[in-house]
């Protein structure tokens, strides 16, 4: 959250200290700034031990962190063993963890658990062993234990292969809420709790053990929902030392954050806004494309493009998740954080081209939805066309990714928010992705870092809105809406057909109105039309196409924004004979081509790359 990340996460450490945490397994985020930062800054600030039994010095089996901690409670020795995700090395900056490596978490857990239960007091012994895995199931408690095991091989191993000497298994990392009573391997009839308490302190996982003669004989496990507000906290709790210390830490963090919110982090040349229903005031319109949401989609693609962060190829953002606008000028911490207030984490998921197209179809919401259409924002390497009058699940007419038509069979890595990756906003197909990785990166924090990286009032490029549309409605005038989508056919030596092109302009405030639309094939102009209120009807003219023009893509370029729309096209027919319609110099009455055939032609400007004047 903003109060913590804006202060290098010290408030979070202060609160964990206040509530008297004794030990914690390291997760991937402890290594966000590298191993040196963990041992030289984070650990000294913490009054608890960071455990990592599967974290080794590079190329060795020498532990780089404490593997376990022993505690004595009422004469009972309790051991806590902690392990990190094995994938940590590939989910943080590799340079920061170049001196260490991450081993198999189950193997490391079992190695230490057996050591602590082998009867040799010289290497540590414990009456009770608690396993703290920063790993977990990718499903919540609505799934059965078997379904949860079937959902992930690693979770199945945690449940079925963790040594029988372990009495309790705590999970993390996957942000799920569940508690299971799982059979202990090799112990007839005995079970142990396996639980995870959600995320962002929504719940507290609690386990009560009954111990008889040094052996665990019973247990009760539950996830307790935390108090929604300070007013809901019982008076007795409010007077306790941990609560008072925690409240003081929160108050201090919020006070510092309020000052931090005003600190500049970047600069905008022009406002970036959400779509608006009215031309004079910003009245949010979630059914239209916006410069602000598109910027977030670019951020998702760019921040997650490195291989160690998922290798995202496409960024995708929903309009409802984009909740603020930016004015021209200095951009502050608080203004950036206000755009993404829901504390989503960043996720990569892999879809086939066919699945990605279906996600775009799902912008049209199910019947009865309060908002019939939600316009998704996409990174600037993606462009699609649609026909809203076609039948459900048949409205997307073309998709271009990185200049190439979408391949239904190919795989595309999507970078998005955790809410959407789980099927939020009824994007059910998005939840069907494979190789899903929740990187745990907080959306607002990544946005702040993204802004800082490309915006500096002292001289580096500033942020500018991109007025090139990424989605445009295009359909052939008079076409049968029920017929299968097919390439537009242009015939040599003939005029027609006409295309209706809509939604060429943003409804964001401010925006840039397009004035002209030019159609080309192979760089050769075959049509030109005036754009009025973001729409144009453009007649395609094949009278001067020759046998050399064999392109399969019709390019529509709108000026002055430079919006480029590409749709499939088929060229048929023979070139006109000399002296026929469209022949050079043919100005005879009855000429099918009303234009001056000898007029000088100029190709429309090539599409610029990146955001205008951003230096991206």
Image: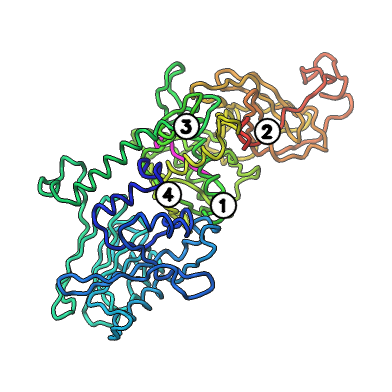
Q: Indicate the colouring scheme.
A: rainbow
Residue 408 place in picture, x, y as percent = 57, 51
Residue 30 place in picture, x, y as percent = 41, 57
Q: Is residue 318 magenta?
A: yes
Tag 3–tag 1 contact (CB < 8 Å): no
Residue 355 place in picture, x, y as percent = 50, 50
> Residue at left 82%, top 13%?
589
- Separation of residues labelled 2 and 1 (CA atoms): 25 Å
- Assign the N terminus to one quadrant of the image: top left
> Residue at left 77%, top 20%?
592
Residue where numbered disc 4 is placed: 421
Mark 3 or 2, which is nearer the eye? Answer: 3
N-terminal of the pair, mark 3 or mark 2, is 3
Residue where numbered disc 2 is placed: 607
Res 136 seen here: no
Please tell me the numbered disc located at residue 264: 3
In the rendered image, the vertical position of residue 112 relative to residue 361, given as above or below:
below
Q: Nearer the viewer, residue 111 or 506?
A: 111
Residue count near mark 2 (Cα–Cα under 10 Å), binned few <14, some 14–19, many ≥20: few
Q: Is residue 349 left or right of residue 368?
A: right
Mark 4 or 3, which is nearer the eye? Answer: 3
Which residue reaches farthest bottom?
Answer: 119
Residue count near mark 1 (Cα–Cα under 10 Å), binned few <14, some 14–19, many ≥20: some
In the rendered image, the vertical position of residue 269 relative to residue 224, given as above or below:
above
N-terminal of the pair, mark 1 or mark 4, is 1
N-terminal of the pair, mark 4 or mark 3, is 3
- Assign the C terminus to one quadrant of the image: top right
- Separation of residues labelled 3 and 2 (CA atoms): 32 Å
> Which element type, helix, strand or loop, lies under badge 2?
loop
Please tell me the numbered disc located at residue 306: 1
Q: Is residue 422 left or right of residue 550?
A: left
> Which element type, helix, strand or loop, lies under badge 1?
loop
């Amino acid at each position: 959250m903003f109060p913590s990340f804006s202060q290098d996460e010290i408030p979070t450490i202060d609160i964990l200290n206040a509530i008297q945490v004794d030990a914690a397994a390291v997760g991937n985020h402890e290594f966000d700034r590298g191993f040196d930062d963990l041992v030289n800054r984070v650990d000294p600030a913490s009054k608890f031990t960071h455990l990592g039994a599967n974290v080794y010095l590079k190329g060795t089996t020498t532990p780089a962190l404490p593997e376990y901690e022993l505690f004595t409670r009422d004469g009972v020795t309790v051991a806590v063993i902690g392990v990190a995700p094995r994938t940590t090395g590939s989910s943080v900056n590799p340079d920061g963890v170049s001196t260490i490596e991450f081993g198999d978490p189950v193997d490391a857990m079992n190695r230490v658990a057996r050591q602590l239960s082998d009867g040799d007091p010289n290497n540590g012994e414990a009456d009770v062993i608690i396993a703290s895995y920063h790993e977990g199931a990718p499903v919540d408690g609505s799934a059965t234990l078997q379904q949860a095991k079937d959902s992930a091989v690693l979770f199945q191993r945690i449940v079925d292969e963790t040594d029988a000497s372990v009495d309790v298994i705590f999970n993390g990392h996957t942000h799920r809420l569940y508690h299971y009573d799982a059979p202990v391997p090799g112990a007839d009839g005995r079970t142990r709790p396996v639980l995870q308490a959600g995320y962002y302190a929504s719940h507290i996982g609690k386990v009560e053990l009954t111990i008889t003669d040094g052996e665990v004989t019973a247990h009760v496990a539950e996830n307790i929902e935390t108090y929604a507000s300070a007013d809901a906290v019982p008076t007795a709790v409010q007077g306790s030392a941990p609560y008072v210390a925690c409240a003081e830490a929160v108050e201090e963090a919020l006070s510092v954050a309020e000052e931090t919110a005003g600190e500049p982090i970047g600069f905008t040349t022009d406002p970036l806004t959400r779509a608006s229903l009215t031309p004079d005031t910003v009245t949010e319109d979630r059914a239209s494309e916006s410069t602000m949401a598109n910027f977030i989609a670019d951020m998702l693609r760019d921040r997650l493009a490195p291989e160690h962060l998922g290798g995202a190829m496409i960024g995708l953002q929903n309009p409802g998740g984009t909740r603020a606008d930016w004015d021209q000028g200095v951009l502050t911490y608080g203004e950036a954080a206000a755009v993404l207030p829901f504390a989503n984490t960043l996720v990569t998921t892999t879809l086939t081209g066919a699945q990605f197209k279906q996600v775009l179809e799902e912008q049209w919401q199910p019947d009865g939805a309060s908002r019939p259409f939600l316009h998704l924002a996409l990174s600037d390497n993606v462009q699609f066309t649609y026909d809203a009058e076609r039948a459900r699940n048949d409205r997307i007419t073309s998709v271009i990714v990185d200049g190439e038509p979408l391949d239904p069979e190919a795989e595309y890595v999507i970078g998005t928010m955790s809410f959407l990756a789980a099927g939020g906003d009824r994007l059910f197909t998005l939840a069907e992705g494979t190789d899903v990785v929740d990187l745990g990166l907080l959306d607002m924090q990544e946005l702040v870092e993204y802004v800082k990286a490309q915006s500096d009032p002292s001289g580096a490029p500033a942020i500018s809105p991109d007025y090139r549309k990424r989605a445009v409605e295009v359909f052939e005038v008079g076409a049968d809406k029920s017929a299968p989508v097919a390439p537009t056919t242009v015939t040599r030596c003939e005029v027609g057909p006409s295309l209706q092109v809509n939604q060429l302009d943003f409804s964001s405030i401010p925006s840039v109105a397009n004035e002209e639309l030019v159609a080309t094939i192979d760089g050769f102009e075959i049509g030109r039309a005036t754009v009025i209120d973001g729409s144009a009807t453009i007649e395609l003219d094949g009278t001067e196409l020759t046998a050399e023009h064999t392109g399969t893509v019709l390019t529509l370029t709108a000026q002055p924004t430079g919006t480029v729309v590409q749709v499939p096209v088929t060229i048929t027919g023979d070139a006109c004979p000399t002296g026929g319609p469209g022949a050079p110099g043919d100005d005879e009455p009855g000429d099918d081509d009303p234009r001056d055939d000898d007029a000088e032609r100029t190709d429309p400007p090539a599409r610029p790359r990146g955001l205008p004047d951003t230096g991206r």
